[in-house]
Amino acid sequence: MTPSASILISGVSGWLSGARAAENANGPADAIARQNMLQLIHLRWIAVAGQVVTILAVHFSLGFKLPLVEMMLVLAALVALNLFSLLRLKRAEPLGPYDLFTALALDALALTIQLYFSGGATNPFTTLYLLHVILGAVLLEAWATWAIVALISFCFVGLIAFNRPIVASGLSDQAFFELFIMGMLIGVVLDALLLVTFVGRINANLRGHDARLAELRQRAAEETHIIRMGLLASGAAHELGTPLATLDVILGDWRRMPLFNANPELAQELEDMRGEVRRCKSIVTGVLQSAGEARSGEVRASTLRGFMDEVIGEWRTTRNDPNLIYETDLLDATPIVAESTLKQGVHNVLDNALEAAATTVRFRASVRGGWVLIEVEDDGPGFAASALEDFGKPYNSTKGRVGGGLGLFLVVNVLRKLGGSAQASNPPEGGARVVMQLPLSALEITRNG
């Protein structure tokens, strides 16, 4: 089989099964409705296949004379209904409140027509009506469920009054009764199997919907928390700007005083103080840039290798050159936007490694398959089990500090905003490892023309 033929068959198979028919959902509620419609479509395929086998077996093997042409036309109509339903799912228009009701009602009418041609109310497969009632109770609103009950009741009463009796040649009354009991048994077992299967799937869809909503609520709460932290940080940065500028001016005046010029030790301490003030001003500027409040230079271009070198260089300078092993196979040729929040996130991870009583911290940066991979390892005691379980949640810290545990929380959210993720683990050889990954396209500068 050629690859193109294989792709065509796979596409037709996926289309007929409805595996990709729910991709155009408009929100979580519409996604659930589409998944439930898919369950009805799958159930209808099973019904068509089962009826074909049953009708042919009863007609040719058991001696019952059935109107094959009429009954096969009903099955053809069910197939056409399924194909129409799949086309409906492929449209972007959301499913309305009447779509599932209409689908169940048409299935009930099709079953009624088949029963009409095969004995009416005396057909043992009338138990399949219960399947429609229970599915209606699970899938539909109250009014629609009662409408299905009314429809099925009307259809059953109609089958009592009108039907085409089936003729069995060569069967005694006892043999006919035994076949009737066997048909009832098959109908009840079939009801039970289908209900367990499809109601279970529908409940799984609902549980998945609830889990998704819970995840979205959690993410919204985390983002609200981050916004509040950002506002507090931005406000603090504004408030700190004036006293830091005042300190810088005062220290500059002191540097020209004879007392400090005459004492080299005091002069050196004064320069150290000025250096720390400049560092604080740089941090404040970085906070304002991250909040989008810098007056100039909000977007700064760099290269991926240059950005990583800058991240490590700044961290080494401000942490008294710790024992950090820096490994990378990055090239300078990839132009990117120097994302200050990503830099701060990497600094947070490195700070955590340094504070974990580690003697050596290893940093690796690489690009694999369009993803930027950043690995930070240390030879400390590793993460506690509770820290691994709640990795990335706010205030998940074992350091005992008030407000601790926000560093990794911010890292996870920064990466998530960039389309990436972070995972933590304890390697078998000891220590701790944090792997950060994000798509290169989130940073890369695309050149037009």
Image: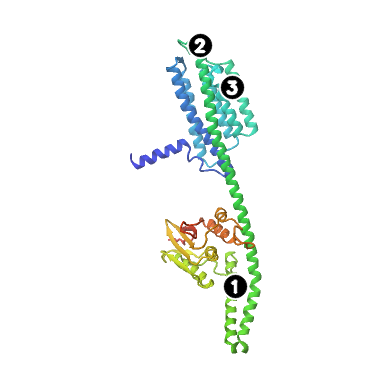
Q: Which residue is mark 1?
A: 280
In-front residue for pair 286/91: 286
Image position of 220 (left or right of 87): right
State the CA–CA distance, disc 2 to disc 3: 29 Å
Q: Quadrant of residue 242?
A: bottom right
- Residue 152 x/y as whole percent: 60, 24
Q: Amino acid at mark 1?
A: Cys
- Give the x, y percent position of residue 35: 54, 38
The mark closer to the camera, 2 or 3, is: 2
Residue tagged 3: 155
Q: Is residue 336 above or below residue 32?
A: below
Q: Amino acid under label 2?
A: Gln
Residues under numbered marks 1 and 3 in contact, where contact means CB atoms less than 8 Å apart: no
Going from the N terminus, do you reach mark 1 or mark 3 first? 3
Q: Nearer the viewer, residue 31 or 214?
A: 214
Above or below, 283 against 176 in this view is below
Image height of 179 relative to 345, above or below: above
Indicate which disc, 2 or 3, sits on the residue closer to the N terminus.
Answer: 3
From the viewer's perspective, is 322 left or right of 97? left
Task: Tell me if residue 8 can be seen.
Answer: yes
**Distance in Å between CA atoms under marks 1 and 3:** 81 Å
Instruction: Please give the label number shown on residue 174.
Output: 2
